[in-house]
Image (cartoon, grey):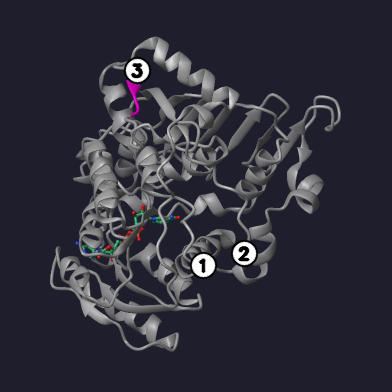
Amino acid sequence: MSKPYNRRQFLNQIAATGAAASLAAAAPPERTAKPMDKVRIGFVGVGGRGRGDLGNLLKMEGVEVRAICDIVEANVVRAQKMVTDAGQVQPEPYSRGETDYKRLCDRDDLDLVFTATPWELHTAVCVEAMKKGKHAASEVPIATTLDECWELVETSEQTGRYCIQMENCNYDRVELMVLNMVRQNLFGDLIHARCGYLHDLRAGKFNDSNGRKLWRLQHSLRRNADLYPTHGLGPVAQCLNINRGNQFDHMVAMSSKSQSLHEYAAAEFGTDSPQAKLDVALGDVVTSLIRTRAGQTVLVTHDTNTPRPYSRDYLIQGTKGIVQKYPEAKIHLDGKSPGHDWEDLIAAYADQFEHPLWRALEERAQGSGHGGMDFVQAYRLIYCLRNGQPLDSDVYDGAALSAVTELSERSIAANSKTVDFPDFTRGNWISRKPLGIVTA
Ligand SMILES: NC(=O)c1ccc[n+]([C@@H]2O[C@H](COP(=O)([O-])OP(=O)(O)OC[C@H]3O[C@@H](n4cnc5c(N)ncnc54)[C@H](O)[C@@H]3O)[C@@H](O)[C@H]2O)c1
């Protein structure tokens, strides 16, 4: 909205025709770091997810976990045992309160700080790590506000350190296969996508067992926004080459009323319970609609308060075909699929179009969390660091995806007014190269 209309039209056109690369000034080189024989890791936040991430990293050759931080000492002890059980030296503990991660970042024997804390700490830990000369990896979302997105971008640029949002859904089997097919032009020019995070988290939001902080609930009480946009948007952004020849341009968001979390609390804890009296800001279903510079639309849904089966509502649609996942993966390709019908994606196309990364790692990934994608993600992180290759996702990707939270919040608060995406790449998106088909 702040940009003149004709400039946007122009950029849409060049992004759509693929002429962008030749028009732009030379792109800054892809961030790389020297190959490292060992990746020495300090881990911050070893709750439910952190332990899963740690377990996968410990399966990787060349990983040494040197330090573990959590405000709950028992969690540190449990994680230390995971490390020693994996045959490594016991990592140093850090559990002297909320900011003890800073002491961990001060160590001079770490290459990477990995955080799986509650959302509000991700940016602070990553920034501290980069300022102390370490690469930073964070669970999703890597930022909760636009200011945090910019802080990450600026710190990564100033320090030359990697800052990666660990979006594991980019590595799920179907999403990888579809990316492979997109790269081989099976769907023609992409036109539309759908995605989201539709996950009944009502019980989890009120689960304070073992002294768990109700941080997810706190966000739902405070903010009416798409609080968790990256699981859905990550794989879609890769297909659409976001930040690499294309960008999210502007969006609108709308929220339904907020009712289901309150009803759940009343049924679970009693109508007079403190839980039932909470004022929930988050609408039950938050819907965002994004338009890209290349003229595609992306419909994003956030729904964590209603009773429903899990879905990321993944759909990619182009001029020559459409594919969707949830409840099962199905595809229609113009001229190939029968009539107006769907075909089963895996049965009909996996032999030919299985992503090479998945093909290579499927067996090793079995039983490693979320159907194997968590293992593949950890593998790629460590492989790239050890081989001096750019990571699959960078600080601009993390910022573009996480920005949807504040942008949706602003749009909803302004009666679904259009809001513009900041250009975190400062124009370099035009000439940055799309991610290729990586192999193991
Ligand atoms: N990628 C995925 O599939 C996936 C799945 C689940 C959770 N997550 C993400 O992982 C993160 C953690 O989620 P979770 O479910 O494990 O939550 P959790 O509450 O189980 O774990 C958070 C941990 O961080 C610790 N912690 C809190 N404040 C801290 C501080 N100041 N310093 C150090 N440690 C601190 C807590 O004690 C706890 O052990 C969230 O960002 C969540 O969105 C991602």
Q: Secondary structure at mark 1?
A: helix
130 and 310: which is toward the camera? 130
Q: Is residue 270 visible?
A: no
Compared across the picture, whether 281 is left or right of 141 comes to: left
Residue at image position (52%, 66%) is: 379
Q: Is residue 376 visible?
A: yes
What amino acid type is highlighted by mark number 2?
Ala
The secondary structure that dominates the magenta segment is: loop
Which residues, given as a range, are shown in magenta?
A: 417-421
What amino acid type is highlighted by mark number 1?
Tyr
283 and 243: which is toward the camera? 243
Quarter of the rendered image showing ligand 1: bottom left
Image quadrant in which the N terminus is located: top left
Q: Which residue is mark 2?
A: 440
- Circle 1 crowding by C-alpha within 10 Å: few under 14, some 14–19, many from 20: many
**Which mark lies nearer to you, 3 or 1?**
1
Q: Secondary structure at mark 2?
A: loop
